[in-house]
Amino acid sequence: MKDFAEPLTRLIHELGRLPGVGQRTAERLAYHLLNADTEDVLALAGAIRDIKTKLKPCRVCFNVTDGETCSICASPTRDQGRIAVVESVRDLVAIERSGAWNGVYHVLGGRVAPLEGRSLETSTFSKLLKRLEEDTEGRIREIVIATNPDAEGDTTALVLKEHLEGMGRKVTRLARGIPTGGSIEFANVDILKDAFEGRDPV
């Protein structure tokens, strides 16, 4: 790294911290930015700054939004009586791309992993319970557990089921169209549609 000027060294270091970006890729990206038009580079820097300064969790479902409530929760065309509980915003985005779901969401922001010290208490699950408790008119009819079909996702689904039972709502889980160990984020449209259409009671 001695051969690089300090700003370039710093940029390569920061790019190399991104997932899937090794030393050579970081250097290639850094030189691309160095040689790009100033306006393009500043636009990229602005977009990166804005995702940290202008985006925040939706006050209802914890999707990302630039307002108080995300567009899904605010939509009059969505079925507000059915909530899909997902692990991450990335899973929500994958489901939205598939067009398989017309209900709303609740983003946990994590999953149960006892060995790593992660439990429902470290997620937004308490906010989901509050959401259900405040629904005194019974408009929320179904909770769909849409966690990933791997060990941690299964553990999360089991704990969710235990907490949600007895709350007077139908609780289902996505059908096993997604291969065990797979990820909602990378499932194709047809698999996600089948998983939602064939969801099972838990």
Image (spheres, grey):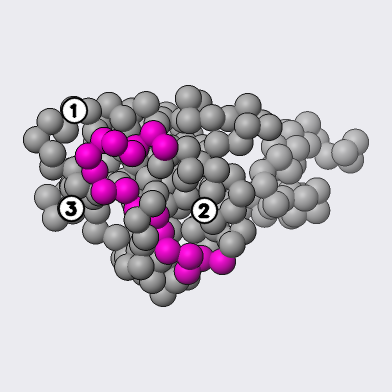
Q: Is residue 65 left or right of residue 149?
A: left
Determine whether label 2 and label 1 are within 8 Å by CB: no
Using the numbered discs, state the Cα–Cα distance from disc 1 to disc 3 in whole angstroms: 17 Å
Q: Nearer the viewer, mark 1 or mark 3?
A: 1
Q: Which residues are magenta?
A: 162-179
Label 2 belongs to which residue? Answer: 148
Q: Residue 123: which numbered mark, if any?
A: none
Please identify the quadrant where the N terminus is shown. top right
Comparing 8 with 52, the one in front is 52
Label 3 belongs to which residue? Answer: 79
Label 1 belongs to which residue? Answer: 134
Point out the tag, 2 or 1, that comes first from the N-terminus. Answer: 1
Residue 63, can we see it?
A: no
Using the numbered discs, state the Cα–Cα distance from disc 2 to disc 1 in whole angstroms: 28 Å
Disc 1 packing (10 Å; few <14; some 14–19; many ≥20): few
Residue projecting furthest to the bottom: 190
Q: Residue at x 40, y 42 (%)?
A: 161
Q: Can you give x and y, in whole percent of width and height, for residue 93 in the image?
A: 40, 54
Residue type beneath disc 2: Asn
Dot 3 falls on a residue whose secondary structure is strand
Dot 2 falls on a residue whose secondary structure is loop
Comparing 75 with 153, the one in front is 153
Dot 1 falls on a residue whose secondary structure is loop
Q: Can you give x and y, in whole percent of width and height, for residue 72 in the image?
A: 25, 48
